[in-house]
Amino acid sequence: ELQYPERINCGVVLLDDAVREGHGDRVALYSDNGVLTYAQLLERSNRIANVLVKDMGVVPGNRVLLRGPNNPTLVACWLAVMKAGAIAVTTMPLLRAHELSVIAERARVDHALCDSRFAQELEHAAALSGQLNNIVYYEADRGGGRLEKMMNGQASTFDNVDTARDDVCLLAFTSGTTGTPKATMHFHRDVLAMRAVVADHLLETSPEDIYVGSPPLGFTFGLGALLVFPLGRRGASVLVEQPSGENLLSAVQRCRATALFTSPTAYRALLPLVSKFEISSLKRCISAGEALPKATSDAWHAATGIRIIDGIGATELIHIFISAKGEEIRPGTTGKPLPGYQACILDPEGLPLPPGKIGRLAIKGPTGCRYLDDARQRDYVYQGWNITGDLYSRDEAGYYRFEARADDMIISAGYNIAGPEVEAALLEHPAVKECAVVGVPDEARGQIVKAFVVLNDGNEGSAELAQTLKQFVKQNIAPYKYPRVIEFRTALPKTATGKLQRHALRVPPKS
Ligand code: 3UK
């Protein structure tokens, strides 16, 4: 059971306590511009907390928007917001002015700390929303920004604000694969719970571990992987501003990283590069955001000897809640609920289904879900059970298997066809690099299965190859699921968190 004292501040636990325990001289952060020890990070964070409280007038409970690429200044800002008892509103670097203005309005944000390279979009959002009246820019690790000047005028110690374990400390917006972003609220204890459940239990990391990955700190996947887990376990985090495949692997090599966090798409993109880097330091690879197809898991295992840990997480629940480790990993399934979490599969009436049946995944656990929007809370959370937008099944052994997002189930001539199952089958073919399978309207069948395929280098899209791929799918899964239409593309549409945007592909076929 996860028990925390009634008064606790997650920023203090992650940072001040690490220094107090004697980790001050150890490296906390590696970045493109050098290293920062725990003591240096604490000093920076204290100065920023003083700026927030004394220069900007932030009081406990105020919302502070944070915006920038993954680097030590963003980490110091996030921790400063916690220590000041304020609420961090984290944003994905890829968001544009309109989306930012929606967030600023929904979260009623006035204060912001923002990387100066992202100023234009945020200024535009401020004008659109009438919020964001108090933005302070930083120059990342180059110094010289307004925040850095204000920091120089402030003390290097800070009187941490005494917060309750159930005080909100984070407003995280879902990536919104379809509609507008939805705000979820998290408490100080939720941040500590994700450390306990994922870093302690699932990953079993130690202070020797060095974490690296691609997800932005504005996405709770990245917040856990690259801030909460490394600092909470007194290890080190490697922050990569531009996480291309080369940059990630060279960061692993340079810093001798032991734990890698990224998405299934990124693991596929890394495959042709791994042999060019010295990555023998890696012990664990974690995939989340989308289902990890068996083909990707097997190819990564063949190339590196490491079995990827797949885990389903959600902004609503802050981090991963179903996964498996070590010998328990069964590629093609996500795993079992992590300690403290319960999972259930529901029929359309909301009644639990037996093993083998496909239905809505519902989750109950220590970390949520609390929507800012009352109507959402009423519709999607019932007696602590959070109804996710995912269709899952459970086998007799208790393993949970992702079938599709509820909106991505294709109904063709009366058959239910899960797009991701067809995608997994296509990905087994050596010519296929990426693919997205959707239902498109069809007069005779209601919908037909259509695949958008990106090919690996050295392959050419042609009618023959399309035919070959159709045959290939028919041989590997039930023939009625094969894609009747295949379109070759050079890239696929993605959300700000890197998920396939299937709905953007669901347009009627040209006749
Ligand atoms: C999908 C997965 C199958 C699923 C997230 C780790 O992705 C995260 O949060 P989001 O709010 O999206 C949640 C939705 O994404 N999904 C995520 N992981 C998997 N589907 N297999 C997976 N392994 O549809 C879920 O409902 O953007 C992931 C940690 C923190 C996160 N916020």
Image (cartoon, rainbow, N blue to C red):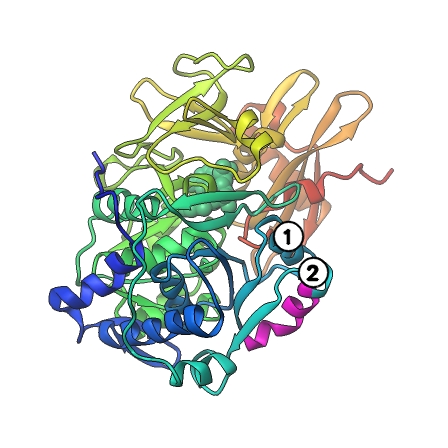
| x then y, percent, for residue 296 | 43, 46
Secondary structure, mark 2, is loop
Q: Is residue 50 magenta?
A: no
Disc 2 packing (10 Å; few <14; some 14–19; many ≥20) = some
| x then y, percent, for residue 170 | 44, 51
Verify CB contact (< 8 Å) between mark 1 and mark 2: yes
Residue under circle 1? 105
| x then y, percent, for residue 71 | 42, 71
Marks 1/2: CA–CA distance:
8 Å
Amino acid found under the numbered disc labelled 2: Gly
Vertical placement of residue 108 versus 352, above or below: below
* Quadrant where the N terminus is found in the figure: top left
Secondary structure, mark 1, is helix
Question: Main SS type for the magenta part?
Answer: helix
In the image, is 425 to the left or to the right of 160?
right
Q: Earlier in the sequence, mark 1 or mark 2?
A: 1
Is there any visible trace of residue 186 in the rendered image?
yes
| x then y, percent, for residue 189 | 31, 45
Amino acid found under the numbered disc labelled 1: Glu
In the image, is 318 to the left or to the right of 432?
left
Q: Residue at x 61, y 26 (%)?
A: 481
Front residue (pair 456, 178): 178
Magenta range is 115-126
Mark number, residue 130: 2
